[in-house]
Image (spheres, rainbow, N blue to C red):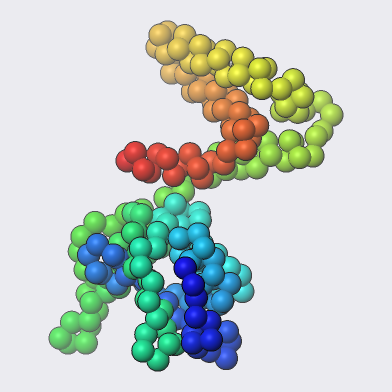
Amino acid sequence: MSIPWEQIKFDDNGLIPAIIQDAETGKVLMLGYMNREAVEKSLQTGRIHFWSRSRSKLWMKGETSGHIQSIQEAYFDCDKDALLLKVKQTVAACHTGHFSCFHNKIDDHCGIMEEGGTVFQPDEVYQGNVTILKELYQVVMDRKNNPREGSYTNYLFEKGLDKILKKVGEESAEVIIASKNRSRGEVIYEVSDLLYHLIVLLADQGITLEEIYGELRKRR
């Protein structure tokens, strides 16, 4: 997609407001700000990126929650100082869990009423306890990139894929046995072992947890 940079008007801070609209329903989802890098990244990847004014950094919408916005169409207005991006929204646009950030309606008495409808889990809750998996993945990746003597994780990486796969198979069998025994404590223990070895396998294959989460969301 060719970008007419000479026509687009960024403000004194190098930013341009971007209105995000649901391509299917026409509902306005949110308003964000982009610098040139965010515009380029958004159009190159097909996923919305913003410039965070509070953190002074580029970020992709949904990078932690998985609530990504896939660009369907892109426009700039008649004054060329604002963007309109029509997207396919995954789950919810608002961090509160609402589909749109514009869910507070001003009533006739100048009060504010919150609209009804489905409210999804907000980003920080959506991640919930699965953050421990992310922490574990980070530890496994650290062992892979910075080996430590005596580390079991490093032992697995050193032995290679066949050893990792053997352990995944063994732990899967242990889960089956514990489940057949109807032993709740054993099932918890063995599933935890299996998850650890699966994460080692993902790290070995260069696959992130976000890719797994994304696949599960698609199936949902």
| Residue 126, placed above or below residue 197 | below
Which residue does the image show at 38% across and 72% down from the upper left? 74
Q: Nearer the viewer, residue 21 or 187?
A: 21
Q: Quadrant of residue 204?
A: top right
Which image quadrant is residue 91 in?
bottom left
Work out whether residue 188 or residue 4 is closer to the camera in this orientation and state it: 4
Left or right: residue 38 versus residue 24 is right
Residue at figure coordinates x 81%, y 25% from the top left: 150
Q: Quadrant of the C terminus?
A: top left
Percent from the top left, x then y, of residue 102? 30, 73
- 44 vs 126, left or right, is right
- Residue at image position (46%, 57%) is 62
In the rendered structure, the answer to whether residue 41 lies left or right of residue 85 reads right
Residue drawn at 56 percent across, 27 percent down = 198
Residue farthest front in this picture: 2
Res. 15 in view? no
Picture layout, residue 96 above or below residue 76? above
Q: In this orientation, does residue 91 appear? A: yes
Q: With 64 as the anchor, is 203 left or right in this view? A: right
Image coordinates of residue 42 in percent, x first then y, are 49, 66
Provide residue 159's location: percent of width, then percent of height.
74, 20
Q: Image height check: is 34 above or below 175?
A: below
